[in-house]
Image (cartoon, rainbow, N blue to C red):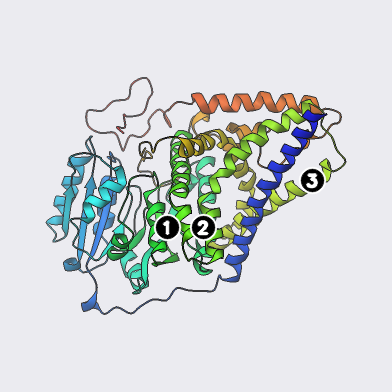
Amino acid sequence: MVTELLLLGGHALLASTLSLYGLHRLWLTSRYWRTRRQAPTLTTLEERALPLVTVQLPVYNERYVITRLIDAAAALDWPRDRLELQILDDSDDDTTPLAEAAAARHRAKGLDVTVLRRPDRQGFKAGALAWGLSRAKGSIIAIFDADFVPPADFLRRAVPALGPEIGMVQARWTHLNEGESWLTRVEAMLLDGHFVIEHAARARSGRWFNFNGTAGLWRREAIHDAGGWQGDTLTEDLDLSYRAQLVGWRFVYLPDLAVPAELPGDILAFKSQQRRWAKGSIQTAKKLLPRLWRSPAPWPVKLEATAHLCANLAYPLVLLLSVITPLAAIQRVGHPLVEPLHAVFFTVAMTSLSVFYGVSAGATHNDWARRLGRVPWAMALGAGMAVNQSRAVFEALFGEVGAFVRTPKRGESGGAVDTPWAATAAPSLRSPSAWGSSSAPSPACSPGPGARRRCWRCLAWATCGWAWAASARRRPRSRWWPPKLRQPGERLIDGERPRRDG
């Protein structure tokens, strides 16, 4: 009896808490919809009064994309005498000669471009940005990661948004290779929800939001006022964003300014990226939430900032729920309220996701109805990442800072590719959630014919899914992958990809 009550109570508590995340999504969507016609204030800049802009390109072993990145940055429409390009190169592979060659080519055309190399990688990306900032000439700092391709008019459209009290301007990410696989399609939908709904809702309602590490501008004074770049978390961008807002700087989000970038094309790269983001966000929460709650910021700002920074705490809850659900089925835990509660929780989960991603797709794509079909895949991928993300959360809470692990880039720009099943098959077929673990409660909890059979099926498939996630290895995207990127003297051995340092 006690076991049944504990399982039933634990299941109800976890499902209720996760439903709050769904309700929060609905609230963000509502705020976005009510403020969707708001536009940021832009200042008028005379050509002779344009500020000096330093463009920073932090790179580490990016041989496949470094030339594309430098060429795109060099093509920015800005007076040559007021534009500085810093290539912050921490590489230990053949990225450096490629960067030097591209820099020399643009330097010969009159661009102020420098390749800066540090004696060590202390502080990782944060250390590189701080190193470059100490040598930068500009009062405005633009930052682009290696897999981004800024449009030529980026500065012309972003700099006017930097009013006197504005410390940072963030542009919206778009996707170079969205159509490559089911994984990249779901990634694109997840990121669109973040950039279309979350950023816009927070920015327009006076809540705080963050710089995403790339595709944005900083006022140099704001970086200094906030204490500069710091490497004690894995999300130096999130950390600096909240520190800057804590000292009074305001941020602007430009959803109409789109900057395309490359999505992780295989599950291993995606897991690495998401783990870093999850761990870094919880590290930032540990570091800054006490200071935030002592600050004079309004209560709505404090509450939303807490929800933002602690969002990844949902993953351990999903993991616990995926364990309790089959246990409850084995014990035949039942109560008259179980089925109605399941219906409520499942409805909240599906409604919040469908509305959230449906509205974000409708704002940026004409085929929003078709894109809604990706919602179940997104739920599957999210639950399938629960082990990976939960580990990151616990490491952030109880472990050390850890090393900054870069996300591999391939320099691809879209299109479908024939790929091995294990590398890029539909996420719902690979994630544990497809086998019964989901953020939405499962009817397997309720007793009845077949409940025990469904439970063992869930456990069996979940075990297969987690075993795959734990043992997946890198595999070639095709036998010829990728001929255009292979470097001189490099050869493929036993069907594996070219070596990527770092």
Type of the residue with mark 3:
Leu
Q: Is residue 291 above or below residue 434?
A: below
State the mark number for residue 494. none
Q: Could you tell me how far apart the alpha carbons at marks 3 and 1 are, in whole angstroms?
A: 38 Å
Look at mark 2 in the image and give the residue it sits on: 305
Q: Nearer the viewer, residue 26 or 64?
A: 26
Q: Are marks 1 and 2 in contact (CB under 8 Å)?
A: yes
Label 2: few (<14), some (14–19) or many (≥20) C-alpha neighbours in 10 Å: many
Disc nearer the start of the sequence (3/2): 2
Give how far apart the Cα atoms at labels 1 and 2 are: 9 Å
- The residues tagged by marks 3 and 2 sit, at their Cα atoms, a distance apart of 29 Å
Residue 203 position within the rendered picture, expressed as x and y whole percent measured from the top left = 49, 66
Q: Nearer the viewer, mark 3 or mark 2?
A: 2
Image x and y of residue 62, in percent: 29, 41
Quadrant of the snapshot with the C terminus: top left
Q: Earlier in the sequence, mark 1 or mark 2?
A: 1
Amino acid type indicated by mark 2: Ala
Q: Nearer the viewer, mark 3 or mark 1?
A: 1
Instruction: Residue at 32% x, 47% y: name it.
Output: 146
Q: Residue at x 73, y 24 (%)?
A: 456
> Residue 29: which quarter of the image?
bottom right
Circle 1 residue: 242
Q: How many residues crowd mark 3 within 10 Å: few (<14), some (14–19), many (20+)?
A: some
Number of labelled discs?
3
Q: Locate the N terminus and report the quarter of the image it occupies.
A: top right
Helix, strand or loop status at disc 3: helix
Q: Is residue 437 visible?
A: no
In the figure, is residue 310 to the left or right of 494? right
Q: Is residue 437 above or below residue 36?
A: above
Disc 3 target residue: 341
The image position of residue 54, as x and y in percent, is: 23, 61
Q: Earlier in the sequence, mark 3 or mark 1?
A: 1
